[in-house]
Amino acid sequence: MRLAEENPYDLAILDIMLPGMDGLALCAALRGRGFSKPIMMLTAKDLVEDKVKGLDSGANDYLNGSTGPTLPGPAPASAWGWR
């Protein structure tokens, strides 16, 4: 949390399974403190319920190592304004 608040990052990449504070709680806390940059969840958790929790916590995108079904939504490039 401290690093995100003290540094001008363009993107935060979080894992759900972080030591101490999990990535969902960290994402929600960052959003609650006004962190407006894109947040991507990059994790091994691949259940639809996990993806929904990640996006509900404030993440802009959720990626995992699975090749299963994906949630509908914009591609990361368009979601973040990249061309």
Image (cartoon, helix red, strand yellow):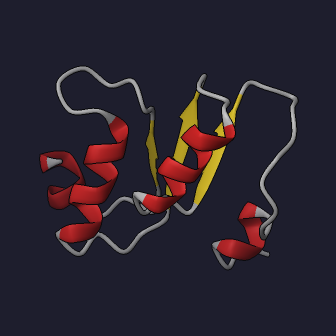
Image location (x, y in percent) of residue 81? 67, 79
Image location (x, y in percent) of residue 45? 59, 26
Q: Which residue is found at the position 36% from the left and 44% from the top?
A: 24
Q: Is residue 82 visible?
A: no
Quadrant in the picture for residue 48: top right
Image location (x, y in percent) of residue 53? 49, 49
- Looking at the picture, does residue 46 appear above or below residue 25? above
Q: Which residue is found at the position 18% from the left and 48% from the top?
A: 1
Please state, as top left, top right, bottom left or bottom right, where the C terminus lies in the image.
bottom right
Q: Which residue is found at the position 17% from the left and 69% from the top?
A: 33
Quadrant in the picture for residue 80: bottom right
In this view, the residue farthest toward the bottom is: 81
- Looking at the picture, does residue 7 appear above or below residue 73? above
Q: Relative to the observer, which residue lies in front, 83 or 58?
A: 58
Image location (x, y in percent) of residue 3? 19, 47
Q: Relative to the observer, which residue lies in front, 49 or 22?
A: 49
Q: Which residue is found at the position 49% from the left and 65% from the top?
A: 38
Q: Is residue 50 visible?
A: yes
- Looking at the picture, does residue 29 appear above or below residue 20? below
Q: Is residue 64 left or right of residue 75?
A: left
Q: Is residue 65 left or right of residue 59?
A: right
